[in-house]
Image: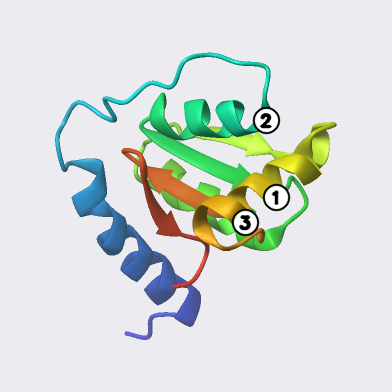
Amino acid sequence: MKISRWCMAVTLTILSILPFLFENGNGPVQVVEASNSVSAFVQNAIYSNRITIFSKSYCPYCLRAKRVFVELNEQPFVVELDLRDDGYEIQSVLLDLIGRRTVPQVFVNGKHIGGSDG
């Protein structure tokens, strides 16, 4: 039985994120105080949600990353940067935070687990 490269990549991605999903069972505990700044929005998105994906609605790699969580029956908080006026600023905050401004960028329980590499 042949397994496609895509199926193998998705399987490996799912296996790599499972420890993060069940690490503490309660999700992230840090909540950043609300503010009008883009940086505070990013921090709140990351630490107030069990799973956060910074994405662009048209990006095939972002669709792939979001599909992984659908297959796990998980509901991520998705920030579609191309649909926001401050999307470019959010990417700049991500660059400062994790050294990348590319999408997707996935956070589970407040920890950055990467993008769509599989």
Task: Specify the amino acid type for callout 2.
Answer: Val
Which residue position holds label 2? 38
> Mark 3–mark 1 contact, CB under 8 Å?
yes
> Mark 1–mark 2 contact, CB under 8 Å?
yes
Q: Does residue 39 lie above or below 4 as drawn?
A: above
Q: Position of residue 17 (x, y in %)?
A: 30, 55
Task: Specify the amino acid type for callout 3.
Answer: Leu
Q: Going from the N terminus, do you reach mark 3 or mark 2 first?
A: 2
Which residue position holds label 3? 95
Label 1 sits on a secondary structure element that is helix
Label 3 sits on a secondary structure element that is helix
Q: Quadrant of the rendered structure where residue 109 is?
A: top left
Q: Does residue 4 lie above or below 84 as drawn?
A: below
Q: Going from the N terminus, do you reach mark 1 or mark 2 first?
A: 2
Which residue position holds label 1? 92
Residue farthest to the right, as pictured: 85
Q: Residue at x 81, y 35 (%)?
A: 83
Left or right, 64 with reference to 49: right
Q: Residues within 10 Å of mark 1 (few under 14, many from 20)?
A: some
Task: Specify the amino acid type for callout 1.
Answer: Ser
Quote the CA–CA distance across marks 1 and 2. Answer: 10 Å
Label 2 sits on a secondary structure element that is helix
Quote the CA–CA distance across marks 3 and 2. Answer: 13 Å
Point out the image quarter for the N terminus.
bottom left
